[in-house]
Amino acid sequence: MTRRAPAVLCALVVLLAGCGRPAPILRPASGTGRPEGEVDLVAWPGTVEDGSNDPRMDWVRPFERRTGCVVTVRYVNTVDEMVGLLRQPGAFDGGLVSSDTAGRLIGHGDVAPIDTRLVPGLARLLPSLRRPGFATVRGRVYGVPFDYGPNLLVFNARVLRRPPTSWRTTWFPSPRLAGHVIRYTSPIYLADAALYLRAHRPALGIRDPFELTDAQLQAAAGLVQRQAEHSEKSWAQFSEEISAFADGSVFAGVGRPIVLDLTRAVPVRAVVPREGVTGWVDAWMMTAHPAHPACMYRWMQWTTEPSVQAEVAQWYRAAPANPAACVALRQAVGPSADSIRYGRCGDGPFLRSMAIWRTPSSDCGDGRHDCTDFRAWLAAWATAIANANEGGTP
């Protein structure tokens, strides 16, 4: 497997490029779909392993031996990097796209709908992940769900001896926590603020944290700004949060299950607060101009295998999209496989309870068209952070 170094953040003008036409369904050029010998991917660190980091974790080399497709992967740490790379025509065959990013790529025509007959394993994935939404749009399937997980309230159990029960701990921290709360540094974090406001400011009328009117969006941005004014701590990749807990600069914040196992210097725990949690889903998507479509189809099919997904869950601490993988996971790590550390693997009600990230759109989904889109979220986020850095609005 070949690795490429992460790319730099793409320019704002690229992120805000206008929408293109939907791409056609892509099939291998030859009737037999003969593998082209390689596949070029974009992915998050830890999701494409060939045994180099841990010989027990290798779902790349078995794929290469079985298909003859050599895997090349470029790792990215932010959604902006992911978008920038997948928008380069012909540079990559596909990527592991987060649910908050999919709408931008689909709307811009950067990814193509797939022929589901070439990915039979898709039918065995959780129905909740295959329903119309980020990976299925207007009846066309764009993605093969791979993993998912919650954004939890993580905290230092040595500082907070009594587990918190509400996100108020992070939005309105006590004097002891002031300056030691960490947030996720992305516009999609506004949905976490909206989730809290939905429970505590019902007069705002928030029904869905991703379908916000301008007034609701500004309220969420105000909450984010307040938090940022009281603490400058933020993370774009989970390793930054791990370091912040380890060096004692952070006591609480929003985080992913993987933080629990990799933060060993301090006792970090996690809870699902009473307001609920947001969550994310990753899906493999094919670019609109792949050089190796046959190998990409084989890769997408390979990633649906329970054995592959069980390894990913152990290594990346994400819940697998194939429920059969939960059985293999429990056999590998014991009863703790269905704990919060693995996104409550196979827990359908918990999955349905999460507010899964998706790209904000002006189409509210219920006949209304007065919701704010991604551009508005990006602007509101940028203003909130800028105001916080300047010490608040006049």
Image (cartoon, helix red, strand yellow):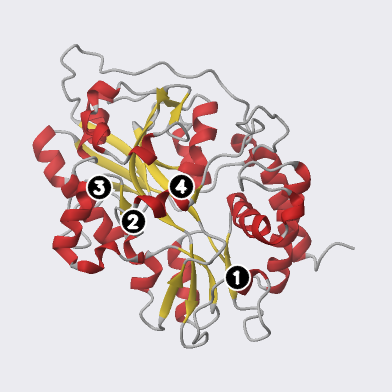
Q: What separation in Å lies between label 1 and label 4 (alpha carbons)? A: 24 Å
- Mark 4 neighbour class, 10 Å CA radius: few under 14, some 14 to 19, many 20 or more: some
Q: Which mark is residue 7?
A: 4
If you read the primary sequence from the N terminus, does the residue marked by circle 4 or circle 3 appear first? 4
User: 10 Å neighbourhood of mark 2: few (<14), some, or many (≥20)?
Assistant: many
- Element class at badge 4: loop
Between marks 4 and 3 in the image, the one whose residue lies nearer the viewer: 3
Dot placed on the residue nearer the N-terminal end, 1 or 2: 1
The residue that appears at 61% across and 48% down in the rendered structure is: 209
Residue 140's place in the image compared with 50, above or below, is above
Q: Which of 43 and 184 is in front in this view?
A: 184
Query: Pointer 1: what residue?
Result: 233
| Mark 4 to mark 3 CA distance (whole Å) | 34 Å
* Position in image of residue 282 (x %, y %): 39, 45
Sort mark 3 into few (<14), some (14-19) or many (20+) by Cα contacts within 10 Å. Answer: some
Seen from this angle, which residue lies furthest left? 65
